[in-house]
Image (cartoon, rainbow, N blue to C red):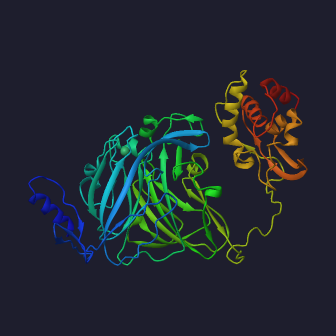
Amino acid sequence: MLLSILTSLAFACQAPVAPTLVVEGGDGVTSINGVTVSSEFGPIIGEEKAVLTSPPNVPAPINRNHPTKLIVDLEVLEFVAPIADGVDYTFWTFGGTVPGSFIRTRVGDVVEFNLHNNPSSKMPHNIDLHAVTGPGGGAAASFTAPGHTSQFSFQVTNPGLYVYHCATAPVGMHIANGMYGLILVEPAKGMSPVDKEYYIMQGDFYTEGAYGEAGLQPFSMQKALQEIPDYVLFNGSVGAMVGDKAITAKVGESVRLYVGNGGPNLVSSFHVIGEIFDNLYVEGGSLVNHNVQTTLVPAGGSAIAEFEVEVPGTFIIVDHSIFRTFNKGALGMLKVTGPDDLLVYSGKQDDRIYQPEGGAVQEIPAAEGAKTPSSRTMEERMTLGERSYKVNCLACHQANGEGIKGAFPPLAKSDYLMEDTKRAIDVMHKGLSGKITVNGVEYNGVMPKVNMSDDEIASVLTYIRNSWGNEGGKVTLNEVLEAKSAH
Ligand code: CU
């Protein structure tokens, strides 16, 4: 086996210089110092430069029926980039993206790995590839100062989907800053053909400021130690696979997702809403399960999920530890276009009134320990109001206040909301049911009475009346109290 040849040659040399693989002229067979290199996977023929891709893209399948010498050039880059709208973070990356470049190999390949650390880097870095059989997975051999390149070689001996990551101390911090990616080792017969392949990798992030707090946010070691992330993300930022950045497929196509989890801390309950994994390579290994709804992806682990898309629509990709999805960013989208199949999925067939408890307004229980009212600045009202909005209102009225057509009226540029402050306060105190007209559109739903403190009502209404193009000025605690006493 190659590794033993490498080892014996290393011992034979007086100076401990690692031998170099050389491709001989005519037959294209790789050799070391004139000795043909062969292994249980057959002779290593020729050499190739690996094609590396950024997420969510995956390099094309390998069609070789033999192992080769595969040259990988991966550059470490440190830079500041948005982690969310208006929020910046200092990322450390393999190849300029989080997760790092996808590496595709075939079992038996001898990988010549060149790790370049850009001269602009402030830190040394290295790489531990879980596809490597050897101490540290390559970590010691690849330790690289800024402005240096390290080279080492390894043979990929086990097919599967493997995580790679930086292993330079403090290891957790290097991983938390985005230093992880995936390397695929295809079996000798290759992966079965599919129509679409994508690369998705989850990671948890720890910032000094809370989720969404604007500006450049430093890494928080304290939160990382407590394992309480502010962000849980697919592919490195909030919205990285949403809207026009969603992954796509057409009805009838087969889709394969190469899923990884960089951690550093959390285990992922990976799920695609509205899909079932026909085939699932458990933990990225050779065991294939079928008909799986949600799969666990450990920190430092992976899974390969395959399914066919039968109907059109937007399929939401989540960590089913669901607060992470709707409150910490772990949300991606697969957009499927094509004709409906009403047998597989009918869509909504009917909508009628169902009120087992009568038409009365329901109550959402009050949170304990409501704040003592006090006078507040506009800035305080906006900050507190935004927080209350996200907790109490966002699910129905949406982050941008546009509501949901046919169900929840818009708050952005809403004539109903803006023309009467007292009525808006009453709605918060008492809830609302029955027909109302907002911007010329009729709504006939039930909004529960939201048991916020008067102080919170003043704040959230101030926030709503001064966001998304609304210009309504401050709602004071006095106004809220007066409206209440008039009930
Ligand atoms: Cu590093």
Q: Quadrant of residue 388?
A: top right
Viewer-side residue, 14 vs 373: 14
Q: Is residue 370 above or below residue 398?
A: above
Asked whether the viewer can see residue 366, the reply is: no
Determine whether 247 is above or below 173 in the image. Answer: below
Observer able to see residue 379: yes
- Which percent across, then down, holds residue 371? 67, 27
Q: Quadrant of residue 129?
A: bottom left
Q: Looking at the rendering, in which quadrant would you find the C terminus?
A: top right
Q: Residue at x 73, y 21 (%)?
A: 375
Q: In the drawing, does residue 235 fall left or right of residue 183?
A: right
Answer left or right for 374 relative to 7: right
Count of marks overlaid on the render: 0
The x and y percentages for residue 236 are 51, 49
Left or right: residue 362 compared with residue 437: left
Ligand 1: image quarter: top left
When the figure is inspected, residue 313 is found, relative to residue 481, above or below; the finding is: below
Q: Quadrant of residue 133?
A: bottom left
Residue 297 horizontal side relative to residue 273, left or right: left
Residue 52 percent across, percent down from the top left:
43, 60
Above or below, 45 against 53 in this view is below
- Residue 190: give x, y in percent of width and height: 40, 76
Placement of the N terminus among the 4 image quadrants: bottom left
Q: Residue at image x 31%, y 73%?
A: 67
Depth order, front residue of 182/115: 115
